[in-house]
Image: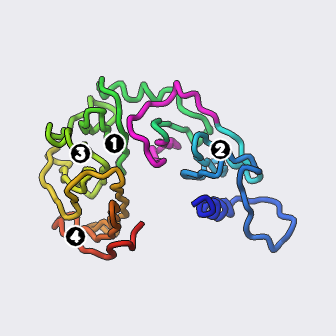
């Protein structure tokens, strides 16, 4: 796995100019010897000044084309999360980048290369008193907040957050909770950690459907989803729990077409 991430970071950083002692050089091995905090790379993104922001386990680094510099963060200016996330980043617009890693939510201004100290103030209008378990940002940059009790709220950064879903008592007792929210045209697909899917409609502000196509009998901490917009009507959705699957999902008819199955998706 470490070699895989070294390959990814090396390939990505090729776009940056650097002086090479050999005109035939195409790849460089970049690791802790170049100042990288460790080789557990979570994600990387290019900032507006051309430098690369790299999130490793326990530290952010900035690559300047030659070496890595640490980008330390005062944890006072983060939002605690109850969920230990595989590091995820979201484009917040206007140069802002939201990042989740190791029970923390960060907000980074990629134009200045600094962490935003007003991150907690940005949630004041939500009027939520319960601790956050998880945070998701959709394509329209609305926040979806999962609280410690399992409630799901949608927050537009202006008005108080609106509750969208709360697990039933029997679901809570079984550890069932929201795992992911996908924006799909006029709908949002809310996946629970059993694979059961709820369809929330933007216009009515209500849950208008349920789907158990990819559901399993019991919740799983290993349940994962990822998706891409295939066209105006379809999403490509990968689902992974005990096995992996890739589907073509029709947003409007809610039909699933299996593309790959079993061990094909890891």
- Is residue 85 a member of the stretch shown in magenta? yes
Q: State the extent of the magenta-drawn residues as a range.
A: 72-101
Q: x%, y% of residue 249?
A: 25, 68
Q: Are marks 3 and 1 in contact (CB under 8 Å)?
A: no
Relative to the observer, which residue lies in front, 230 or 153?
Answer: 153
**Residue 250 is drawn in which quadrant?**
bottom left
Report which residue position mark 1 lands on.
142
Q: Are marks 2 and 3 in contact (CB under 8 Å)?
A: no
In the image, taking residue 62 as reference, residue 176 lies left or right, namely left
**Residue 251 is drawn in which quadrant?**
bottom left
Report which residue position mark 2 lands on.
61
How far, Cα to Cα, is label 1 from label 4?
26 Å
Q: x%, y% of residue 264?
A: 39, 73
Residue drawn at (36%, 54%) of the image: 222
In the image, taking residue 259 as reference, residue 101 lies left or right, namely right
Report which residue position mark 4 lands on.
256
Q: x%, y% of residue 83?
A: 39, 39
């Amino acid at each position: 796995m470490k070699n895989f991430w070294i390959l990814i970071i090396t390939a990505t950083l090729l776009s940056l100019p650097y002086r090479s002692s050999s005109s035939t050089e195409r790849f460089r091995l970049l690791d802790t010897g170049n100042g990288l905090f460790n080789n557990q790379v979570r994600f990387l993104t290019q900032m507006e000044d051309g430098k690369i922001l790299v999130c490793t386990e326990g530290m952010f680094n900035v690559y300047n084309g030659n070496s890595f510099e640490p980008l330390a963060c005062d944890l006072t200016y983060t939002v605690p999360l109850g969920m230990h996330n595989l590091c995820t980043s979201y484009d917040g617009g206007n140069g802002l980048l939201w990042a989740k890693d190791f029970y923390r939510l960060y907000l980074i201004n990629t134009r200045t290369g600094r962490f935003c100290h007003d991150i907690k103030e940005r949630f004041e209008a939500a009027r939520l008193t319960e601790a956050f378990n998880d945070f998701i940002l959709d394509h329209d940059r609305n926040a979806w907040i999962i609280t410690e009790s399992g409630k799901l709220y949608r927050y537009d950064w202006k008005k108080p957050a609106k509750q969208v879903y709360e697990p039933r008592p029997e679901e809570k007792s079984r550890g069932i909770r929201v795992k992911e929210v996908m924006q799909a045209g006029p709908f949002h697909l809310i996946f629970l950690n059993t694979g059961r899917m709820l369809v929330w409609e933007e216009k009515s502000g209500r849950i208008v459907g349920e789907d158990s196509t990819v559901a399993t009998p019991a919740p799983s901490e290993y349940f994962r989803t990822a998706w891409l917009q295939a066209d105006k009507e379809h999403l490509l959705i990968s689902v992974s729990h005990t096995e992996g699957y890739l589907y073509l999902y029709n947003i409007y008819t809610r039909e699933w077409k299996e593309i790959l199955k079993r061990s094909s998706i890891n």
